[in-house]
Image (cartoon, helix red, strand yellow):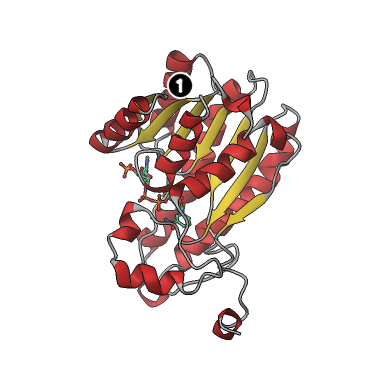
């Protein structure tokens, strides 16, 4: 991996647990200075303590990314603590299940606020500082659900994750004049704390649908994000990397056993 992430100032929204924690861990292991952002201080502080104990540079900042004011304060904190901002990982998101027949205006709009508007707010707030960076990057965590696949109960979630990709394609053009790249990682089923809590049977049955025969780790997503933030990825913008062990490939269950 590139040494180009050393000393970079990186914000990871939703960095306190799950995929964001994996992203934070990978960036910290490459010598980046990481600001972990979430709403729950206990989890965020515990993650930062782990990163620091492993030799990394990290701090926690409490913010709700759906708040314009709190997102502005988040960027200011990265500048204050880490001397600027080079990389924004817009990862925070939610995935409540709701069948289409039961969908309410609140459930639909609320998820668009959390997953789409918050991402836009973070990118917008980061722009003035990213423009000052020698190699400014934005990496969005989308999903295979929506852009590529579907799952009952997640019509609103899938729509938000596909919307993120519509956003980055135009943002990539608008940001290019300032040398800022913006790309997205599309995780498949990743072994987060929440997924581990669903039990071994669920994990095994899901893994059986994946050609590589296992679920992804949070670090698998972190490595893809780190690549997109690296010097080597400087000519890639408006693109996606699917990290799913081949999950989207089989055209039928028979393809896995043929
Ligand atoms: P997770 O374990 O539930 O973690 C979500 C993180 O986001 C937490 O740090 C949470 O902290 C933070 N967060 C949520 N809402 C926030 C808000 N309004 N303001 C600030 N922070 C907020 O979820 P995950 O599975 O890691 O998912 C992370 C991202 O990956 C999401 O965008 C999700 O769509 C995507 N993804 C996940 C999977 C998977 O298999 N897990 C697959 C595809 C895509 P607080 O609650 O303390 O704020």
Q: Quadrant of the C terminus?
A: bottom right
User: Is 56 on the left-hand or right-hand side of 147?
Assistant: left
With respect to residue 34, does 192 lie above or below?
below
Residue 32 is situated, as x and y percent measured from the top left of the image, at 51, 25
The quadrant in which the N terminus is found is top right
Q: Position of residue 228 (x, y in %)?
A: 63, 39
Q: Can you say whether 121 is above or below 93 in the image?
A: above
Vertical placement of residue 112 versus 15, above or below: below
Is any atom of residue 99 visible in this view? no
Number of numbered discs visible in the structure rendering: 1
Q: Is residue 211 left or right of residue 25?
A: right
86 vs 163: above or below: above
Where's residue 124, x and y in %?
56, 33
- Local packing at callout 1 (Cα closer than 10 Å; few below 14, some 14-19, many 20+) is many
Q: Quadrant of residue 86?
A: top right
Label 1 CB, ligand 1: below 8 Å?
Answer: no
Foreground residue among 200 and 235: 200
Residue at horizontal 38%, vertical 48%? 18
The reply to whether residue 147 is in sight is: yes
Residue in the picture at 70% in, 40% down: 172
x and y, in percent, of residue 101 in the image: 39, 77
Q: Quadrant of residue 65?
A: top left
Considering depth in this image, is 231 or 177 the residue closer to the camera? Answer: 231
Helix, strand or loop at mark 1: helix
Residue that badge 1 annotates: 78
Please report the residue visible at 44 percent of the width from the left and 14 percent of the height from the top: 80
């Amino acid at each position: 991996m590139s040494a180009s992430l050393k000393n970079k100032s990186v914000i990871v929204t939703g960095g306190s647990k799950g995929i964001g924690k994996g992203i934070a861990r990978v960036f910290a292991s490459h010598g980046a200075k990481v600001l972990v952002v979430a709403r729950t201080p206990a989890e965020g502080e515990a993650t930062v303590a782990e990163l620091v104990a492993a030799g990394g540079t990290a701090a926690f900042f409490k913010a709700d990314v759906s708040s314009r004011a709190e997102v502005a304060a988040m960027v200011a904190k990265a500048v204050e603590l880490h001397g600027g901002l080079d990389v924004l990982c817009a990862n925070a998101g939610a995935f409540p299940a709701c069948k289409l027949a039961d969908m309410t205006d609140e459930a639909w709009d609320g998820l668009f606020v959390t997953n789409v508007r918050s991402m836009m707010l973070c990118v917008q707030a980061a722009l003035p500082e990213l423009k000052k960076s020698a190699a400014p990057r934005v990496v969005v965590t989308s999903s295979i659900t929506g852009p590529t696949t579907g799952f009952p109960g997640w019509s609103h979630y899938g729509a938000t994750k596909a919307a993120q990709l519509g956003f980055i394609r135009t943002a990539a053009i608008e940001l290019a004049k300032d040398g800022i790249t913006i790309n997205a990682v599309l995780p498949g089923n990743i072994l987060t704390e929440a997924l581990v809590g669903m039990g071994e049977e669920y994990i095994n049955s899901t893994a059986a649908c994946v050609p590589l025969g296992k679920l992804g780790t949070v670090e698998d997503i972190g490595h893809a994000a780190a690549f997109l933030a690296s010097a080597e990825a400087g000519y890639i913008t408006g693109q996606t990397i699917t990290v799913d062990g081949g999950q989207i490939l089989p055209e039928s269950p028979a393809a896995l056993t043929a």
